[in-house]
Amino acid sequence: MVETLPHHTPPPPNHHQVLVLKSAICSRLLLVTLIILFRTLVSPYDTSASLNPPCLSTPNPNSTTHPSPLENGVVWDSVYFLRIAQCGYEYEQTFAFLPLLPLSLSLSSHTLFAFLSPFLNQRPLLALSAYVINNMAFVLAALYFYKLSLTVLKDPQIALRATVFFCFNPASIFYSSIYSESLYALLCFGGMYHFMSGGNNLAVLFFALSGCARSNGVLNAGYLCFQTMHRAYHAMFQEKRVTLALQIVIAGALRTACIFAPFVAFQAYGYYNMCVGRSPDEIRPWCKARIPLLYNYIQSHYWGVGFLRYFQLKQLPNFLLASPILSLALCSVVHYAKSRPQNFLSLGFLAPMEEKSRGVVFLLDELSRSKEARSVKKSSVRVEAEHSNLRRRKNVSKGDAANVHLESEPAAIWPGYLSASVLPFVLHLGFMACTAFFIMHVQVSTRFLSASPPLYWFASYIMAYPGKYSRWGYVMWAYSIAYIFLGSLLFSNFYPFT
Protein backbone atom coordinates (compact mmCIF):
# COMPACT_ATOMS: atom_id res chain seq x y z
CA MET A 1 0.00 0.00 0.00
CA VAL A 2 1.39 3.39 -0.99
CA GLU A 3 1.79 5.77 1.93
CA THR A 4 -0.17 9.03 1.73
CA LEU A 5 2.04 12.06 1.20
CA PRO A 6 1.99 14.88 3.74
CA HIS A 7 -0.03 17.87 2.63
CA HIS A 8 3.01 20.13 2.25
CA THR A 9 4.86 17.77 -0.08
CA PRO A 10 4.43 18.67 -3.78
CA PRO A 11 3.22 15.94 -6.11
CA PRO A 12 6.14 13.96 -7.58
CA PRO A 13 4.79 13.16 -11.08
CA ASN A 14 8.22 12.34 -12.54
CA HIS A 15 9.02 9.91 -9.74
CA HIS A 16 5.60 8.32 -10.05
CA GLN A 17 5.94 7.97 -13.80
CA VAL A 18 9.17 6.06 -13.24
CA LEU A 19 7.34 3.74 -10.83
CA VAL A 20 4.54 3.30 -13.37
CA LEU A 21 7.07 2.49 -16.08
CA LYS A 22 8.76 -0.10 -13.86
CA SER A 23 5.44 -1.63 -12.84
CA ALA A 24 4.26 -1.90 -16.44
CA ILE A 25 7.51 -3.46 -17.65
CA CYS A 26 7.68 -5.89 -14.72
CA SER A 27 4.09 -6.97 -15.25
CA ARG A 28 4.75 -7.69 -18.94
CA LEU A 29 7.90 -9.64 -18.13
CA LEU A 30 5.90 -11.65 -15.61
CA LEU A 31 3.16 -12.42 -18.14
CA VAL A 32 5.56 -13.41 -20.91
CA THR A 33 7.46 -15.66 -18.46
CA LEU A 34 4.24 -17.32 -17.32
CA ILE A 35 3.10 -17.86 -20.91
CA ILE A 36 6.37 -19.55 -21.84
CA LEU A 37 6.44 -21.59 -18.62
CA PHE A 38 2.87 -22.90 -18.82
CA ARG A 39 3.12 -23.50 -22.53
CA THR A 40 6.21 -25.64 -21.86
CA LEU A 41 4.84 -27.58 -18.91
CA VAL A 42 1.22 -28.16 -20.02
CA SER A 43 0.00 -29.91 -23.13
CA PRO A 44 -2.34 -27.65 -25.15
CA TYR A 45 -5.95 -28.66 -25.47
CA ASP A 46 -5.96 -27.99 -29.21
CA THR A 47 -2.88 -27.95 -31.44
CA SER A 48 -4.66 -27.02 -34.66
CA ALA A 49 -4.11 -23.29 -34.12
CA SER A 50 -0.49 -23.64 -35.27
CA LEU A 51 -1.57 -24.93 -38.67
CA ASN A 52 -1.21 -22.32 -41.39
CA PRO A 53 -2.73 -23.21 -44.76
CA PRO A 54 -1.76 -21.01 -47.70
CA CYS A 55 -3.67 -17.82 -48.44
CA LEU A 56 -6.60 -18.11 -50.84
CA SER A 57 -5.15 -15.36 -53.01
CA THR A 58 -1.83 -17.16 -53.48
CA PRO A 59 -2.54 -20.91 -53.32
CA ASN A 60 0.66 -22.88 -53.01
CA PRO A 61 0.41 -26.38 -51.53
CA ASN A 62 4.13 -26.43 -50.80
CA SER A 63 4.07 -23.26 -48.72
CA THR A 64 2.87 -24.95 -45.53
CA THR A 65 5.67 -25.00 -42.97
CA HIS A 66 6.17 -26.44 -39.52
CA PRO A 67 5.23 -24.03 -36.72
CA SER A 68 8.03 -22.20 -34.95
CA PRO A 69 8.27 -21.62 -31.18
CA LEU A 70 7.09 -18.03 -31.74
CA GLU A 71 3.74 -19.40 -32.86
CA ASN A 72 3.06 -21.32 -29.65
CA GLY A 73 1.01 -18.42 -28.30
CA VAL A 74 -1.15 -18.16 -31.41
CA VAL A 75 -4.43 -19.33 -29.89
CA TRP A 76 -8.08 -18.30 -29.91
CA ASP A 77 -8.58 -14.94 -31.68
CA SER A 78 -4.85 -14.60 -32.25
CA VAL A 79 -5.28 -17.00 -35.16
CA TYR A 80 -7.62 -14.55 -36.87
CA PHE A 81 -5.41 -11.51 -36.32
CA LEU A 82 -2.34 -13.21 -37.79
CA ARG A 83 -4.32 -14.67 -40.67
CA ILE A 84 -5.72 -11.24 -41.56
CA ALA A 85 -2.27 -9.65 -41.34
CA GLN A 86 -0.89 -12.33 -43.65
CA CYS A 87 -3.74 -12.90 -46.11
CA GLY A 88 -6.23 -10.07 -45.68
CA TYR A 89 -9.96 -10.47 -45.07
CA GLU A 90 -10.71 -13.74 -46.85
CA TYR A 91 -13.85 -14.91 -45.07
CA GLU A 92 -17.00 -13.22 -43.86
CA GLN A 93 -16.43 -13.99 -40.19
CA THR A 94 -12.97 -12.39 -40.22
CA PHE A 95 -14.63 -8.97 -40.52
CA ALA A 96 -15.48 -9.26 -36.81
CA PHE A 97 -11.83 -8.37 -36.17
CA LEU A 98 -11.06 -4.73 -36.84
CA PRO A 99 -8.05 -3.79 -38.94
CA LEU A 100 -5.77 -1.69 -36.71
CA LEU A 101 -3.82 -4.58 -35.16
CA PRO A 102 -3.46 -6.60 -38.41
CA LEU A 103 -2.35 -3.48 -40.29
CA SER A 104 0.17 -2.66 -37.57
CA LEU A 105 1.58 -6.18 -37.72
CA SER A 106 1.86 -6.18 -41.49
CA LEU A 107 3.48 -2.75 -41.57
CA SER A 108 5.99 -3.46 -38.79
CA SER A 109 6.98 -6.84 -40.23
CA HIS A 110 7.87 -5.12 -43.51
CA THR A 111 9.70 -2.21 -41.89
CA LEU A 112 10.96 -2.47 -38.31
CA PHE A 113 11.44 -6.24 -38.38
CA ALA A 114 12.28 -6.64 -42.06
CA PHE A 115 15.89 -7.44 -41.20
CA LEU A 116 14.69 -10.72 -39.63
CA SER A 117 12.92 -11.92 -42.79
CA PRO A 118 15.92 -14.04 -43.93
CA PHE A 119 15.71 -15.98 -40.65
CA LEU A 120 11.96 -16.16 -40.01
CA ASN A 121 9.00 -17.07 -42.16
CA GLN A 122 6.17 -14.60 -42.53
CA ARG A 123 3.90 -15.94 -39.80
CA PRO A 124 6.54 -16.15 -37.05
CA LEU A 125 7.69 -12.68 -38.04
CA LEU A 126 4.13 -11.38 -37.68
CA ALA A 127 3.82 -13.10 -34.30
CA LEU A 128 7.05 -11.48 -33.09
CA SER A 129 5.80 -8.09 -34.29
CA ALA A 130 2.55 -8.63 -32.40
CA TYR A 131 4.27 -9.45 -29.10
CA VAL A 132 6.55 -6.43 -29.33
CA ILE A 133 3.82 -4.00 -30.40
CA ASN A 134 1.27 -5.13 -27.81
CA ASN A 135 3.66 -5.12 -24.87
CA MET A 136 5.07 -1.72 -25.81
CA ALA A 137 1.55 -0.39 -26.29
CA PHE A 138 0.63 -1.62 -22.82
CA VAL A 139 3.54 0.28 -21.23
CA LEU A 140 2.48 3.46 -23.01
CA ALA A 141 -1.14 2.83 -22.00
CA ALA A 142 -0.09 2.61 -18.34
CA LEU A 143 1.72 5.96 -18.58
CA TYR A 144 -1.30 7.57 -20.19
CA PHE A 145 -3.56 6.05 -17.55
CA TYR A 146 -1.48 7.58 -14.75
CA LYS A 147 -1.62 11.01 -16.41
CA LEU A 148 -5.37 10.64 -16.88
CA SER A 149 -5.89 9.56 -13.26
CA LEU A 150 -3.79 12.45 -11.98
CA THR A 151 -5.76 14.91 -14.11
CA VAL A 152 -9.14 13.63 -12.94
CA LEU A 153 -8.52 12.67 -9.31
CA LYS A 154 -6.00 15.40 -8.39
CA ASP A 155 -4.27 12.93 -6.06
CA PRO A 156 -0.85 11.53 -7.08
CA GLN A 157 -0.94 8.66 -4.59
CA ILE A 158 -4.38 7.43 -5.62
CA ALA A 159 -3.45 7.85 -9.29
CA LEU A 160 -0.31 5.77 -8.76
CA ARG A 161 -2.16 3.05 -6.87
CA ALA A 162 -4.85 2.84 -9.56
CA THR A 163 -2.22 2.59 -12.31
CA VAL A 164 -0.31 -0.17 -10.55
CA PHE A 165 -3.57 -2.09 -10.21
CA PHE A 166 -4.13 -1.63 -13.95
CA CYS A 167 -0.64 -2.97 -14.65
CA PHE A 168 -1.63 -6.20 -12.88
CA ASN A 169 -5.28 -6.24 -13.90
CA PRO A 170 -7.22 -9.54 -14.16
CA ALA A 171 -7.23 -9.43 -17.97
CA SER A 172 -3.45 -9.05 -18.18
CA ILE A 173 -2.97 -12.17 -20.30
CA PHE A 174 -4.75 -10.49 -23.22
CA TYR A 175 -2.51 -7.43 -23.06
CA SER A 176 0.58 -9.57 -23.69
CA SER A 177 -0.98 -11.83 -26.30
CA ILE A 178 -1.88 -11.28 -29.95
CA TYR A 179 -5.09 -9.44 -29.11
CA SER A 180 -6.19 -5.86 -29.70
CA GLU A 181 -6.59 -4.97 -26.00
CA SER A 182 -3.22 -3.19 -25.64
CA LEU A 183 -3.67 -0.95 -28.66
CA TYR A 184 -7.23 -0.20 -27.64
CA ALA A 185 -6.22 0.71 -24.07
CA LEU A 186 -3.43 2.99 -25.33
CA LEU A 187 -5.74 4.85 -27.69
CA CYS A 188 -8.63 4.89 -25.22
CA PHE A 189 -6.60 6.27 -22.29
CA GLY A 190 -4.75 8.66 -24.58
CA GLY A 191 -8.02 10.02 -25.92
CA MET A 192 -9.47 10.37 -22.42
CA TYR A 193 -6.39 12.20 -21.20
CA HIS A 194 -6.40 14.69 -24.06
CA PHE A 195 -10.16 15.09 -23.65
CA MET A 196 -9.79 15.97 -19.97
CA SER A 197 -6.83 18.24 -20.79
CA GLY A 198 -8.82 20.27 -23.30
CA GLY A 199 -7.26 18.85 -26.47
CA ASN A 200 -10.47 17.89 -28.24
CA ASN A 201 -9.02 17.47 -31.72
CA LEU A 202 -6.28 15.16 -30.48
CA ALA A 203 -8.84 13.27 -28.38
CA VAL A 204 -10.99 12.75 -31.48
CA LEU A 205 -7.99 11.28 -33.32
CA PHE A 206 -7.27 8.84 -30.48
CA PHE A 207 -10.92 7.84 -30.12
CA ALA A 208 -11.32 7.35 -33.88
CA LEU A 209 -8.28 5.06 -33.94
CA SER A 210 -9.62 3.15 -30.93
CA GLY A 211 -12.67 2.37 -33.08
CA CYS A 212 -10.26 0.77 -35.57
CA ALA A 213 -8.93 -1.50 -32.83
CA ARG A 214 -12.18 -2.63 -31.19
CA SER A 215 -15.80 -2.00 -32.13
CA ASN A 216 -16.63 -0.57 -28.70
CA GLY A 217 -14.17 2.23 -29.45
CA VAL A 218 -17.03 4.12 -31.12
CA LEU A 219 -18.68 4.37 -27.69
CA ASN A 220 -15.95 6.83 -26.75
CA ALA A 221 -17.90 9.33 -28.82
CA GLY A 222 -20.12 9.52 -25.75
CA TYR A 223 -17.51 11.68 -24.00
CA LEU A 224 -17.71 14.26 -26.79
CA CYS A 225 -21.52 14.08 -26.75
CA PHE A 226 -21.53 14.61 -22.98
CA GLN A 227 -19.22 17.59 -23.36
CA THR A 228 -21.27 19.07 -26.20
CA MET A 229 -24.48 18.68 -24.21
CA HIS A 230 -23.08 20.57 -21.21
CA ARG A 231 -21.41 23.29 -23.23
CA ALA A 232 -24.50 23.91 -25.34
CA TYR A 233 -26.67 24.08 -22.21
CA HIS A 234 -24.23 26.51 -20.59
CA ALA A 235 -24.13 28.74 -23.67
CA MET A 236 -27.90 28.65 -24.18
CA PHE A 237 -29.23 29.06 -20.64
CA GLN A 238 -26.35 30.58 -18.66
CA GLU A 239 -24.84 32.95 -21.20
CA LYS A 240 -27.98 33.39 -23.36
CA ARG A 241 -25.89 33.02 -26.53
CA VAL A 242 -27.91 31.04 -29.05
CA THR A 243 -25.31 31.38 -31.81
CA LEU A 244 -22.57 30.01 -29.57
CA ALA A 245 -24.77 27.08 -28.56
CA LEU A 246 -25.39 26.28 -32.23
CA GLN A 247 -21.67 26.43 -32.98
CA ILE A 248 -20.97 24.06 -30.10
CA VAL A 249 -23.59 21.56 -31.31
CA ILE A 250 -22.25 21.62 -34.88
CA ALA A 251 -18.65 21.19 -33.71
CA GLY A 252 -19.67 18.33 -31.42
CA ALA A 253 -21.58 16.61 -34.22
CA LEU A 254 -18.60 16.85 -36.56
CA ARG A 255 -16.22 15.47 -33.94
CA THR A 256 -18.60 12.62 -33.18
CA ALA A 257 -18.87 11.82 -36.89
CA CYS A 258 -15.07 11.69 -37.12
CA ILE A 259 -14.98 9.08 -34.35
CA PHE A 260 -17.57 6.92 -36.12
CA ALA A 261 -16.05 7.39 -39.58
CA PRO A 262 -13.33 4.66 -39.44
CA PHE A 263 -15.75 2.00 -38.20
CA VAL A 264 -18.36 2.97 -40.81
CA ALA A 265 -15.69 2.93 -43.52
CA PHE A 266 -14.68 -0.58 -42.50
CA GLN A 267 -18.29 -1.75 -42.71
CA ALA A 268 -18.52 -0.22 -46.17
CA TYR A 269 -15.34 -2.07 -47.11
CA GLY A 270 -16.92 -5.32 -45.93
CA TYR A 271 -20.06 -4.62 -47.93
CA TYR A 272 -18.01 -3.95 -51.06
CA ASN A 273 -16.07 -7.20 -50.67
CA MET A 274 -18.94 -9.48 -49.65
CA CYS A 275 -21.92 -8.06 -51.53
CA VAL A 276 -20.92 -6.06 -54.62
CA GLY A 277 -20.55 -8.03 -57.84
CA ARG A 278 -22.02 -11.23 -56.40
CA SER A 279 -24.65 -13.33 -58.10
CA PRO A 280 -28.10 -13.50 -56.41
CA ASP A 281 -27.32 -17.01 -55.15
CA GLU A 282 -24.10 -15.83 -53.48
CA ILE A 283 -25.46 -12.73 -51.77
CA ARG A 284 -25.59 -13.10 -48.00
CA PRO A 285 -28.81 -12.21 -46.10
CA TRP A 286 -27.31 -9.17 -44.39
CA CYS A 287 -26.48 -7.61 -47.79
CA LYS A 288 -30.23 -7.16 -48.44
CA ALA A 289 -30.94 -5.44 -45.13
CA ARG A 290 -32.06 -1.81 -45.10
CA ILE A 291 -28.88 -1.00 -43.16
CA PRO A 292 -26.41 -3.72 -44.17
CA LEU A 293 -24.25 -3.81 -41.05
CA LEU A 294 -21.83 -6.70 -41.37
CA TYR A 295 -20.47 -6.56 -37.82
CA ASN A 296 -23.84 -7.10 -36.15
CA TYR A 297 -24.67 -9.98 -38.48
CA ILE A 298 -21.36 -11.74 -37.78
CA GLN A 299 -21.74 -11.38 -34.01
CA SER A 300 -25.26 -12.77 -34.11
CA HIS A 301 -24.84 -15.47 -36.78
CA TYR A 302 -21.42 -16.90 -35.92
CA TRP A 303 -21.11 -16.18 -32.19
CA GLY A 304 -24.72 -16.10 -31.02
CA VAL A 305 -24.47 -12.61 -29.53
CA GLY A 306 -27.80 -10.99 -28.73
CA PHE A 307 -30.02 -9.67 -25.96
CA LEU A 308 -30.51 -12.36 -23.27
CA ARG A 309 -29.36 -15.10 -25.70
CA TYR A 310 -26.64 -16.13 -23.25
CA PHE A 311 -29.02 -16.58 -20.34
CA GLN A 312 -28.91 -20.39 -20.27
CA LEU A 313 -28.28 -22.76 -17.40
CA LYS A 314 -25.27 -24.29 -19.13
CA GLN A 315 -23.63 -20.83 -19.20
CA LEU A 316 -23.71 -20.50 -15.41
CA PRO A 317 -19.94 -21.19 -15.07
CA ASN A 318 -19.24 -18.32 -17.46
CA PHE A 319 -21.43 -15.98 -15.40
CA LEU A 320 -19.47 -17.03 -12.31
CA LEU A 321 -16.20 -16.39 -14.15
CA ALA A 322 -17.33 -12.86 -14.98
CA SER A 323 -18.95 -12.13 -11.62
CA PRO A 324 -15.90 -10.48 -9.96
CA ILE A 325 -15.39 -7.81 -12.62
CA LEU A 326 -19.13 -7.22 -12.99
CA SER A 327 -19.47 -6.89 -9.20
CA LEU A 328 -16.64 -4.37 -9.10
CA ALA A 329 -18.26 -2.41 -11.93
CA LEU A 330 -21.63 -2.46 -10.16
CA CYS A 331 -20.11 -1.27 -6.89
CA SER A 332 -18.23 1.52 -8.70
CA VAL A 333 -21.38 2.86 -10.33
CA VAL A 334 -23.69 2.34 -7.35
CA HIS A 335 -21.32 4.03 -4.91
CA TYR A 336 -21.06 7.10 -7.12
CA ALA A 337 -24.83 7.19 -7.68
CA LYS A 338 -25.61 6.82 -3.95
CA SER A 339 -23.01 9.37 -2.89
CA ARG A 340 -23.91 11.95 -5.54
CA PRO A 341 -27.53 11.14 -6.48
CA GLN A 342 -28.39 14.63 -7.65
CA ASN A 343 -25.33 14.90 -9.84
CA PHE A 344 -25.76 11.35 -11.18
CA LEU A 345 -29.47 11.52 -11.99
CA SER A 346 -29.19 14.99 -13.52
CA LEU A 347 -26.23 13.88 -15.70
CA GLY A 348 -24.11 16.57 -14.07
CA PHE A 349 -26.38 19.52 -14.81
CA LEU A 350 -27.10 20.10 -11.11
CA ALA A 351 -23.48 19.88 -9.99
CA PRO A 352 -22.20 23.06 -8.27
CA MET A 353 -20.88 25.57 -10.81
CA GLU A 354 -17.56 25.98 -9.02
CA GLU A 355 -17.04 22.22 -9.11
CA LYS A 356 -17.79 21.95 -12.82
CA SER A 357 -15.47 24.89 -13.52
CA ARG A 358 -12.58 23.25 -11.70
CA GLY A 359 -10.75 22.02 -14.74
CA VAL A 360 -13.69 19.93 -15.97
CA VAL A 361 -13.56 20.56 -19.70
CA PHE A 362 -17.02 19.20 -20.45
CA LEU A 363 -18.48 22.53 -19.31
CA LEU A 364 -16.35 25.42 -20.49
CA ASP A 365 -15.71 26.01 -24.18
CA GLU A 366 -12.57 27.64 -25.52
CA LEU A 367 -14.62 30.73 -26.39
CA SER A 368 -15.77 31.25 -22.79
CA ARG A 369 -12.84 30.10 -20.68
CA SER A 370 -12.10 33.63 -19.59
CA LYS A 371 -14.79 33.09 -16.96
CA GLU A 372 -12.51 30.67 -15.12
CA ALA A 373 -10.77 33.66 -13.56
CA ARG A 374 -13.84 34.27 -11.45
CA SER A 375 -13.35 31.00 -9.59
CA VAL A 376 -9.71 31.56 -8.52
CA LYS A 377 -10.70 32.51 -5.01
CA LYS A 378 -12.98 29.50 -4.68
CA SER A 379 -10.22 27.25 -6.03
CA SER A 380 -7.88 28.36 -3.26
CA VAL A 381 -10.52 27.37 -0.73
CA ARG A 382 -10.83 24.00 -2.43
CA VAL A 383 -7.05 23.45 -2.27
CA GLU A 384 -7.11 24.06 1.47
CA ALA A 385 -9.98 21.58 1.81
CA GLU A 386 -8.05 18.95 -0.13
CA HIS A 387 -4.99 19.53 2.08
CA SER A 388 -7.24 18.98 5.08
CA ASN A 389 -8.47 15.73 3.56
CA LEU A 390 -4.88 14.57 2.98
CA ARG A 391 -4.01 15.32 6.59
CA ARG A 392 -7.10 13.38 7.68
CA ARG A 393 -6.09 10.36 5.60
CA LYS A 394 -2.59 10.53 7.08
CA ASN A 395 -4.05 10.55 10.59
CA VAL A 396 -6.29 7.62 9.66
CA SER A 397 -3.29 5.63 8.47
CA LYS A 398 -1.61 6.28 11.81
CA GLY A 399 -4.29 4.55 13.80
CA ASP A 400 -7.57 6.47 13.85
CA ALA A 401 -9.29 4.18 11.33
CA ALA A 402 -11.67 2.79 13.94
CA ASN A 403 -13.29 6.19 14.35
CA VAL A 404 -13.86 6.80 10.66
CA HIS A 405 -17.11 5.83 8.97
CA LEU A 406 -16.74 5.82 5.21
CA GLU A 407 -20.44 6.06 4.51
CA SER A 408 -21.00 9.04 6.81
CA GLU A 409 -18.63 11.44 5.03
CA PRO A 410 -17.85 10.15 1.54
CA ALA A 411 -17.56 13.52 -0.17
CA ALA A 412 -14.93 14.70 2.31
CA ILE A 413 -12.88 11.50 2.23
CA TRP A 414 -13.24 10.69 -1.49
CA PRO A 415 -13.29 14.11 -3.18
CA GLY A 416 -11.58 12.85 -6.34
CA TYR A 417 -13.73 9.84 -7.20
CA LEU A 418 -16.93 11.67 -6.31
CA SER A 419 -16.16 14.80 -8.30
CA ALA A 420 -18.13 15.88 -11.34
CA SER A 421 -15.13 15.00 -13.52
CA VAL A 422 -15.71 11.28 -12.94
CA LEU A 423 -19.37 11.25 -13.97
CA PRO A 424 -18.92 10.65 -17.74
CA PHE A 425 -16.54 7.78 -16.99
CA VAL A 426 -19.02 6.21 -14.57
CA LEU A 427 -21.85 6.49 -17.10
CA HIS A 428 -19.66 4.90 -19.77
CA LEU A 429 -18.75 2.05 -17.42
CA GLY A 430 -22.40 1.46 -16.53
CA PHE A 431 -23.39 1.19 -20.18
CA MET A 432 -20.49 -1.14 -20.96
CA ALA A 433 -21.27 -3.40 -17.98
CA CYS A 434 -24.94 -3.69 -18.97
CA THR A 435 -23.95 -4.53 -22.53
CA ALA A 436 -21.55 -7.22 -21.35
CA PHE A 437 -24.09 -8.77 -18.98
CA PHE A 438 -27.24 -8.73 -21.11
CA ILE A 439 -25.97 -8.96 -24.69
CA MET A 440 -22.43 -10.31 -25.02
CA HIS A 441 -20.80 -13.59 -24.07
CA VAL A 442 -20.59 -12.71 -20.42
CA GLN A 443 -17.18 -14.31 -19.81
CA VAL A 444 -15.66 -11.67 -22.10
CA SER A 445 -16.53 -9.04 -19.47
CA THR A 446 -13.15 -9.39 -17.77
CA ARG A 447 -11.26 -8.05 -20.77
CA PHE A 448 -14.13 -6.00 -22.20
CA LEU A 449 -14.24 -3.82 -19.07
CA SER A 450 -10.50 -3.86 -18.37
CA ALA A 451 -9.98 -0.46 -20.06
CA SER A 452 -12.59 1.30 -17.88
CA PRO A 453 -10.83 3.78 -15.55
CA PRO A 454 -13.51 3.92 -12.78
CA LEU A 455 -12.81 0.27 -11.92
CA TYR A 456 -9.26 1.09 -10.90
CA TRP A 457 -10.10 4.46 -9.36
CA PHE A 458 -12.75 2.94 -7.14
CA ALA A 459 -10.49 0.02 -6.21
CA SER A 460 -7.60 2.36 -5.38
CA TYR A 461 -9.75 4.34 -2.96
CA ILE A 462 -10.91 1.13 -1.30
CA MET A 463 -7.28 0.08 -0.89
CA ALA A 464 -6.28 3.47 0.50
CA TYR A 465 -8.06 3.11 3.81
CA PRO A 466 -7.36 0.62 6.61
CA GLY A 467 -9.84 -1.08 8.87
CA LYS A 468 -12.71 -3.14 7.56
CA TYR A 469 -12.24 -1.83 4.01
CA SER A 470 -8.64 -3.03 3.78
CA ARG A 471 -9.79 -6.62 3.41
CA TRP A 472 -11.53 -5.68 0.17
CA GLY A 473 -8.22 -4.38 -1.07
CA TYR A 474 -6.66 -7.77 -0.33
CA VAL A 475 -9.60 -9.50 -2.02
CA MET A 476 -9.18 -7.43 -5.18
CA TRP A 477 -5.45 -8.07 -5.33
CA ALA A 478 -5.99 -11.77 -4.73
CA TYR A 479 -8.61 -11.85 -7.48
CA SER A 480 -6.30 -10.08 -9.90
CA ILE A 481 -3.29 -12.28 -9.17
CA ALA A 482 -5.39 -15.44 -9.38
CA TYR A 483 -6.75 -14.44 -12.78
CA ILE A 484 -3.24 -13.60 -14.01
CA PHE A 485 -1.99 -17.09 -13.18
CA LEU A 486 -5.20 -18.82 -14.22
CA GLY A 487 -5.34 -16.90 -17.48
CA SER A 488 -1.70 -17.58 -18.29
CA LEU A 489 -2.25 -21.30 -17.70
CA LEU A 490 -5.58 -21.77 -19.47
CA PHE A 491 -5.53 -19.21 -22.26
CA SER A 492 -2.03 -19.94 -23.54
CA ASN A 493 -2.88 -23.65 -23.79
CA PHE A 494 -6.15 -23.16 -25.63
CA TYR A 495 -8.39 -23.91 -22.66
CA PRO A 496 -11.51 -21.76 -22.16
CA PHE A 497 -10.90 -18.64 -20.09
CA THR A 498 -12.56 -15.27 -20.81
Image: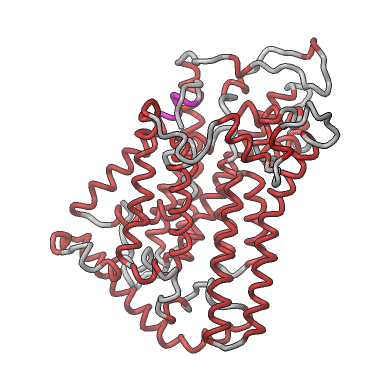
Q: Position of residue 381 (x, y in %)?
A: 36, 83
Foreground of the two, 223 or 140: 223
Is 92 left, or right, of 306 in this rendering? right
Q: Is residue 459 above or below residue 42?
A: below
Is 110 left, or right, of 183 in this rendering? right
Residue positioned 31% across, 61% down in the render: 4
Foreground of the two, 89 or 463: 89
Residue 88 can be seen, yes or no: yes
Q: Residue furthest top?
A: 62
Examine the image and state in which quarter residue 98 appears.
top right
Q: Position of residue 413 (x, y in %)?
A: 28, 67
Display colour scheme? secondary structure
Residue positioned 48% across, 28% down in the render: 33
Is residue 486 within the magenta segment? yes
Examine the image and state in which quarter residue 314 appears.
top left
Magenta extent: 485-491
Q: Position of residue 432 (x, y in %)?
A: 48, 49
Is 234 left, or right, of 382 in this rendering? right
Foreground of the two, 267 or 420: 267
Is 403 left, or right, of 310 in this rendering? left
Dominant SS type (magenta): helix
Residue positioned 61% across, 45% down in the render: 215
Q: Is residue 24 above or below residue 227?
A: above
Is residue 315 within the magenta segment? no
